[in-house]
Image (spheres, rainbow, N blue to C red):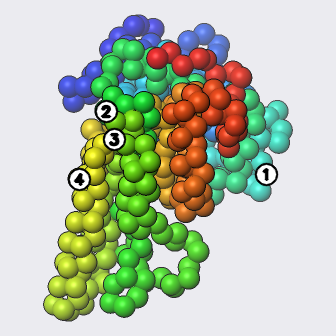
Amino acid sequence: MRLGTILTEGTCLGIALVTSRPLGNAMYFTIRTSNVGLADQLRQLEKLHALGTALGYRYLHTPLADSCHNYRGEILDDFLGLGIGELRWPQSPGRDDQLVNVNFAAILPGASITQDIDATHRALTAVYGESPDTVYRFCYQWRQRTRLVAAHKLSLRFPFFTKYWQRRNQQPMASPFRDAPLKIAVHIRKGDRARLVYKGRHACNGRFIDEHDPTHPHVPVSAYRSLIQRLLDRFSAEKVSFYVFSDGYQATFNRLSRLATSSADREELLSLRERHERELLALGSLPGVRLVVAEDEESMCAAIHACATCDLLIRDVGAFSRDCFHRFNRRPGARVFTLPQQQQLPLLTYCGSLLEMGADTASAAFPAARPRSARQPPDPR
């Protein structure tokens, strides 16, 4: 075992324990997340880590996979500090461990892996054996979703919050907000979730859908603008700072282009794109608003930090901002407001309570929708 620093493409991934093979008689496991978005990968890591720990194995960290949204997994893994304090799966060739990909769906068909950990252990070793020279690589498969959904009940939480703020202590990051008493992050998810009217029909994710399809909820940009304007009218830009982030419409119109079959269709699509992009970019002209429309690693990291440091998060669909808030934010009185389920009046009332009464009084008057674990450490900021 050696203490080392792993470098990838000029980016320091931090100091971690690096092992060329498992040590002693301990059994080891690592996790390979699938090529999905960040929120889904963190859920996979949480569930599979809880399972491996419950089985009595020691964890070897493997960085997150590259995302389907074109983010490099190792960059985000480093930013989040997920490997801090962990042994790392070897990065160099020539190792003599036996790496075994574990397929729980195959060894436990139709059963829940969290109902009986001892039975899960017996099934795993019966198929793959058990040796200190073996590293089990737990791979998430979509058909395992229902079998892994209860893994968090094992009370073996992956310490996302602690690792994130340890990383920020090592690698500080400027606040995305202006200096104001109330900091509000606004996530406007578009991309593959944007719902538009094209060629007289409703369309989403590159295909036409039924106008009343409930699986594609839609919050127009105008609703966000109206809400931000109401907050500014009531509290002023001196008291409220907004960080508005969005993936924009590039993926939306790239996918819609496959529905264009004529030059007239393409002209309509171009006009539609210009109109929607202009409406989104106009949010940046509002006082107290910082707007970032991008899909790159820098903007992703800034969005994560905004979710981790905001007093309020306003969002609509998708799990990214919500999960980042719940995993990394422990600010007193911090809340998530989801549109369109939660209307403007409760949000305005709560903002007023935060500014006038303070976080402790406001949070007592408006209980949080999420449980706060007593095991979580205090906010180090």
Circle 4 — which element? helix
Name the mark nearer the viewer: 1 or 4.
4
User: In the image, which disc is placed on residue 285?
Assistant: 4
User: In the image, which disc is placed on residue 111?
Assistant: 1
Q: Mark 4 to mark 3: distance in Å?
A: 12 Å
Dots 3, 2 in contact, CB < 8 A: no
Question: Which image quadrant: the N terminus?
Answer: top left
Q: Kindly identify the amino acid type of the residue bearing the numbered disc 2.
A: Arg
Q: Residue at x 43, y 54 (%)?
A: 230
10 Å crowding of disc 1: few (<14), some (14-19), many (20+): some
User: 21 above or below 313?
Assistant: above
Name the mark nearer the viewer: 1 or 3.
3
- Report which residue position mark 2 lands on: 178
Which x, y percent locates residue 324?
Answer: 49, 39
Q: Mark 3 to mark 2: distance in Å?
A: 10 Å
Which x, y percent locates residue 195?
Answer: 42, 73
Side of 317 relative to 306 (left or right): right
